[in-house]
Amino acid sequence: MSASTSQRHLQVVAPHEESFASVYRAHVDFVRRSVRHLGAQTSAIDDVVHDVFLVVHRRQRDRSGKGSMKSWLFGIARRVVLHHHRRGARRKRREAAAPVPTPVPDPERAVATLEAATWIDHFLSRLDDAQRVVFVLADIEGMTAPEIAAATGAPTNTVYSRLRLARAKFERALQAREGAVK
């Protein structure tokens, strides 16, 4: 009888006599290949192999003498891989259903944004209506002068004039604000 035939005979006849360490050493490469061929993600192969051998360690005494060690290990590997696939699918469904977390704003930035918005609102309130509309549509909403003329019914040259005056007032107000902040 050859050494490999003798080993197979021992595996079938007396599986309980093999130590866990010897089963691991003899079959870890087979289990790793099986897990990979069964479709485990590359990043999870080590975890799946580990889980397979946890089951082997727990169930080794219960193993019946039927079939070879490899067939028993393959059956365990198949079930563990399926379990990992189901667990991954459940995780993906939970992640998809979970609300997207909103980033917590930096308190200093939130205060600065609020102060800037308040300052701009105050500036806009000091403009006359015609200049305010043109300034908001051009510099906040990004519309062109011809689009603003079409939207307001004002001549295009009038839109340019109002926009020039509003921007000049904005520049002066901004300089005054920066001078006051320093």
Image (cartoon, helix red, strand yellow):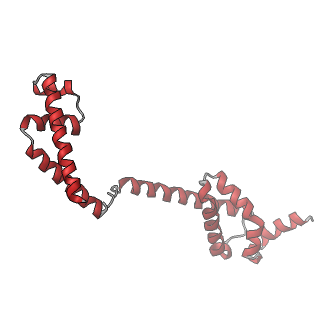
Q: Quadrant of the N terminus?
A: bottom right
- Figure label count: 0
The image shows residue 76, relative to residue 39, as above or below, that is below
Q: Quadrant of the C terminus?
A: bottom left
Residue 57, picture quadrant:
bottom right
Horizontal side, residue 119 vs residue 45: left or right: left
Residue furthest to the right in view is: 1
Front position in the image: 9 or 118 = 118
Q: Using residue 68 as the reference point, say whether residue 95 is left or right of it.
A: left
Q: Is residue 5 left or right of residue 153?
A: right
Q: Residue at position x 40%, y 56% from top?
A: 95
Q: Quadrant of residue 154?
A: top left
Residue 83 appears in which quarter of the rendering?
Answer: bottom right
**Nearer to me, 180 or 103:** 180
Task: Return the x and y of residue 101 as percentages of the image width and height.
Answer: 34, 58
**How far across and down, in percent of the image, does residue 139 sit?**
22, 37
x and y, in percent, of residue 6 in the image? 87, 67
Q: Residue 76 location, x and y as percent?
A: 63, 63
> Which residue: 81% across, 70% down?
10
Q: Is residue 123 visible?
A: yes
Residue beneath the point at 69% across and 70% down = 64
**Residue 67 seen by the camera:** no
- Residue at 33% of width from left, 58% of height from top? 103
Judging depth in this view, the residue of 52 and 136 nearest the camera is 136
In the image shown, does 7 or 38 lie closer to the viewer? 38
